[in-house]
Image (cartoon, helix red, strand yellow):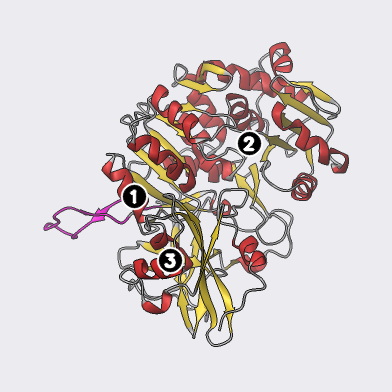
Amino acid sequence: MTIPGLMQRTPLTLRAIFDRMRDVHADGEVVSPEGRTTYGALSDDVLRLVTVLRDLGVQSGDRVATFAFNSARHFALYHAVPLIGAVLHTVNVRLYDEQIAYVINHAEDKVVFVDAEMCGILADVAPRLGSVTDYVVMGDADAQGLAPAHDYDSLVAAAAPAPLDSLPVIDENAACGLCYTSGTTGMPKGVLSSHRGMWLHSMATALAGTLALTEADRVFPIVPMFHAFGWGLPYAAPLVGAELIFHGSDSSAPNIGRIIDDEHVTVTAGVPTIWKDLLPLVQRKDVDASSLRGIYVGGSALPRPLIDAYDRSGIDIVQLWGMTETGPLACISLPRRAHRGLDRDGLIDQREKTGTIFPGLEARIVAPDGSVCPRDGTTVGELECRGPWIASAYYNDPDSGEKFHDGWLRTGDMAFMEPGGTFRIVDRAKDLVKSGGEWISSVELEGALLGHPLIGDAAVVGIKSRKWDERPVAVVVASGGETPTLDSVRDYLTPLVAKWWLPDELVVVDAIPKTSVGKIDKKAIRATLSDMELP
């Protein structure tokens, strides 16, 4: 028989992060396109926003949408909406019009906060939005047909801060945020986060064994706040008092480099394409990036040539893994002990691997027959995860059962796991190339291709083969002033991969198509190459 512990049962809610930001870290700086402010001043804005939301008729459980880039205004909404028990829905501004209308209608959003520069896009779909009662425009521009529309700054300036004792006591299991997947297959799916899940995710993200965030850090999340909750950094940073820098809509390499240089950024995070674009500026010393202690990369695999290039510049670049369904961060590829026990003699660089699951979560590799694969570093199966910030179902989707079973999330990623728990994703299940009964990892082949001196970007897809079922085709963007040939690419890859992995065709393009969150859009590539058939 168990006996209960004699500990207090304080709810784990985002109110705790807001209170700490307001009371303990009030002098922490926040820099954004609107200017410079502090956590203390923004806390006042958050309480004024609570009044604004209530005046607009928002009640507990209502969904409030944002259609916006990274900014202090957006950050204030991250905190104000959950404080009244409502649900923050961060709409991906890069979705297609049909998808934008779908997710807003599916979520039944009541109010939409929209960046001024995005009003035109939202106005095109507004006639199809049945649940929206009000639009609030953030920034100086015309609402372009959105009605009824209000000015964010005017509303906040006129509102009295809501008294702290007027904020409701919220159940830690109540929903706080809604984020939809990128919709690469079918319509996007809604992932509904809880206060408890997001609070625990924030604690785990700040741990010394993960991103090691402290009050001494200046955190620059380049990952959009409309994608997977900005990887949770808008909550993890104020929890520990790390200062925040936002870049608005300009994610060009010169702007990113300028901000890192000017603001003495210590921690930053974004997809690999950001860091590939920034690298020449760092190498030429056009950007002083010496303040950086860590670049954290997610969204797609971190290629070895990029790791080595930043190492030569004295900058540590580390791979993260997660997905919208994992709430969002779930894994990090920090170095591991070379030997266990008393005779350890250093650390093993494992940054090419996906890494080790965050504390608080579990991961396993499952074979097609449902059995759990051994942790032998070779047996490949589907990666599954579970834990307090992992989704258990999709929002308002009765047909999502196949993705979730027995308390585990099926990620759709094929991976193997080593004895110490480190795993490596070899590919998405749908992107593996099946050639003659054997699997070829498009991810690993892409990583090898990126080391070729004449290739600036690369994607690999399987194309139908009359003899082998499928064969790999490399789609590349040329760099260095010359166009690579199939023979030169195969010669380069020969010592790096198995002979039967070598691509049968090479297609040179101006740009690799990407999804709304910066991942390679292999669906679009396959559609372009649909008429191709190999021997």
Residue 470 point in image, percent of width and height: 55, 79
Q: First in sequence, mark 2 or 1: give its number.
A: 2
Real-space CA distance between mark 2 and mark 1, rounded to the nearest whole angstrom: 44 Å
Residue linked to disc 3:
445
Magenta segment range?
Answer: 332-350
Q: Secondary structure at mark 3?
A: helix
Question: Which quadrant, please, contains the N terminus?
Answer: bottom left
Q: Secondary structure at mark 2?
A: loop
Q: Secondary structure at mark 1?
A: helix
Real-space CA distance between mark 1 and mark 3, rounded to the nearest whole angstrom: 16 Å
Horizontal side of 447 relative to 522 (left or right) equals left
Foreground residue among 454 and 48: 454
Q: Is residue 25 above or below residue 270?
A: above
Q: Nearer the viewer, mark 2 or mark 1?
A: 1
Residue linked to disc 2:
170
Residue linked to disc 1:
307
Q: Nearer the viewer, mark 3 or mark 2?
A: 3
